[in-house]
Image: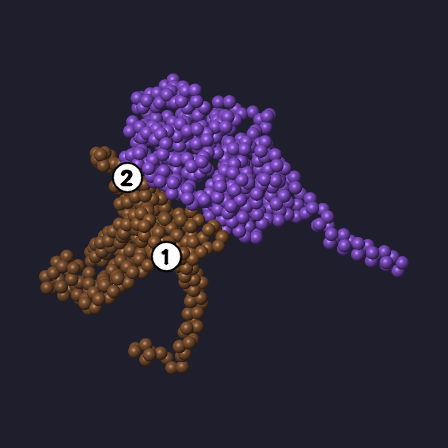
Amino acid sequence: MQNKAKRYPGESKWKGLLYLLPALLLYLIFTFLPILETIRSSFFQAESLYGARSFVWFQNYIKLFQDSQFLSALRNNFVFIFFYSFLPISFGLFLASFLARVRVPGMRLFRTLYFIPQVLSMVVVGVMWRWMYDPNIGPINVFLRWLGLEQFAQAWLGSFTFALPAVGMAAAWVQYGFCMVLFLSGIQRIPEELYEATSLDGANAFRQFWHVTLPGLIPELSVALMTTIIAALRVFDLVFAMTKGAPGGSTEVTGLLIYRWAFELNNHSYAATMATVLTLIILLISLVIRRVFKQSEKGAL
Amino acid sequence: MKKKPFLIIFLLATIILGACQPKQSTPSEKQTLVVWDQFYRDEESKVIDQLNAEFEAKHPGVSIQREVKVLEDLSLTVKLALANEDGPDVAQVNQGRVDMGALVKDGLLLSLDDYAKQYKWNERFPGTLLARNSFSEDGKQFGTGHIYGVSPTAEVVGVYYNKSIFAQHGWAVPTSFDEFLDLLAKIYEVGIVPISFGSLDGWNAIHLFSAIQHLHVSREYIDDFVYSRNDVSFDTEFNLKALYQFYDWVKLDYFTPNFQGIGYDASNESFKKGEAALTITGSWLAPELLTGTDQTFGFFLLPGYEEQQALAIGGLGIPFSIRATTEKKDLAAEYIDWMVSERAAELWADAGMVPAMPLPKKYKLQNDTLFADTVEAWQHINANNLVGHYIDWATPTMYDRLVFWLQRLLSFVSTPEEFIIGISQEYEDWKPYQQ
């Protein structure tokens, strides 16, 4: 309703659309059409690289949901949500509420330092953490031995128990800076009066966080949750650089399988099927998050 | 005025001759040969540049347009590029079913049978080696049919040993497998890591297991297994025996501590520093061990059981192939022939790499060097028909599955028996696809 009143007289709606056209065209050619083609090819099966392909209905999908490798990769993706999303968001929230409320000298420096991992290329992060986890010369084990905790020093990335959490921690290290900066900007938007009022009422820092900061950050939380969960589900580069799915498939993720089927095993249709299913899962989760946060936003206001 | 008709004739003649010239004198025609290779490492790249320059010098008017990529990148892009009219005329195509096999299936590679006869490649390479770059015309049968590539370099997997450590303790190169086992025990006793190893990357674990496996299997079995012939199975007594041997070494602590979390490069780095007495890998490592270290190294083949000629994992480097649709077939074949010439062998040898083709008779290897060791090892297995295989070529997903099961085995998550069941299943599942 308001938009209509804001429009200047004589300005045509079509002119605005015209400005959108170049971007729309690029989107259509480089994003939308490839997505459609991916979905289409998931219903085919090719004889060879360039040979004829035949329409096989849902055969690829049936095969996919019986593929134990895919299912365990998907499970690992969901485990990664903890490391990509919940851990960085909690830690980011803690840091943000701390950095925003307490005046510490050199605050800017800290903010920049915490954000640095987010700027690095994932491959660089992977190579760096691979070295950190090296069982014999890596700093983590060296530190443990120095503390006299020799029994805890181990082959982190080669361990069936610890490889997945170890890669996950590297991911958490990358993500928390982004969450922190997002929450910091959100907190600045919360009216100062709310904090003053609550402190007059005798609320301590924890209660202020619970009743003022958290409800005020709902839009940022929604964005953070959405982007980090999507990152967890489509992870490829970090795992590729650190373990390539080792040991024995315990860090295998869907992204790696898609790569392998498409480019190493020449089965583009099957890779497309995986990609389609992964996209649907991501879409579904995004919708649920939006729905939930839309409602709680209404409740908070 | 009188001269005019003559002038016209002269002009006409030059125009006609000029127009005809390119067709009449092919040798000096301007031609560009587009070549894609994966010799990106400094030493290797210099050899190719040198060979290209000499080829151009011999063929006036021919220029070579070289494009270098790392192997993974090449494998990915070459499948697209060879389907294009303006793709590379000559390209290195990885062996095996998913690369060369897939391209043959779509008719994108030129059969080199005629050129092999013309240039007598079978005199330079034994038939069993040419078979590795051969496929049936439909791309389904591996190791038979037409030749689709020729490899300039060779590889052999064996044992590197630290000569300094050996001299210090008075150890000698073992001549039988039992002597080798004794040696491992002796090294372990003095508190040195016997075998530098890291299984995080996975593929070198396949080599380690398969190196032991090669001591047990017959020539026929390993050929049949890799080429999927004669209905052979992975579930055999000798495969289990080899697995148990490997498993024993893990239990006896013969490998680098925490090797499960160490990558291939890190393991070699540690071996180079003298932190282990041995490491088991391919001849490609030799150039790296020659510089930047104060230790000296040697190389020997994993010795077999008494009175038995032991096979060793070995093979040819990535072969050169020709795009089926190129118009410069003959020139491309001549180029490939140059890449596997005696001159090329000499240059590869100078660079510390093992050439697949024989070295010129006058070429002298420097005795007692690491490189002489690797070349001798290759010549021994090649001359005696003992060149084994990379077993992960057997099926498209074999590499992946072997890494999967080996990493489980090495962490005591699975037993050798479960390993055998897992890989046999993979192999049996693949067979129907073959038909």
Q: Residues within 10 Å of mark 1 (few under 14, many from 20)?
A: few
Given the image, what chain letter belongs to the residue carrying mark 1?
A
In the displayed structure, does residue B278 sit left or right of residue B365?
A: left
Q: Closer to the camera, B352 or B243?
A: B243
Tag of residue B394:
none
Q: Quadrant of the N terminus of chain B?
A: bottom right
Q: Give the vertical position of A141 relative to A184 (above or below).
A: above
At 51% from the left edge and 22% from the top edge, which residue is drawn?
A: B367
Given the image, what chain letter belongs to the residue carrying mark 2?
A
User: Which residue, as the protein is rendered here, is positioned at the far right?
Assistant: B2
Chain shown brown: that is A
Q: According to the image, label 1 marks what residue?
A: A58
At 31% from the left edge and 24% from the top edge, which residue is drawn?
A: B188
Q: According to the image, label 2 marks what residue?
A: A159
**Amino acid type, mark 1:** Phe
**Amino acid type, mark 2:** Ser
In the displayed structure, does residue A50 sit left or right of residue A68?
A: right
Q: Closer to the camera, B130 or A44?
A: A44
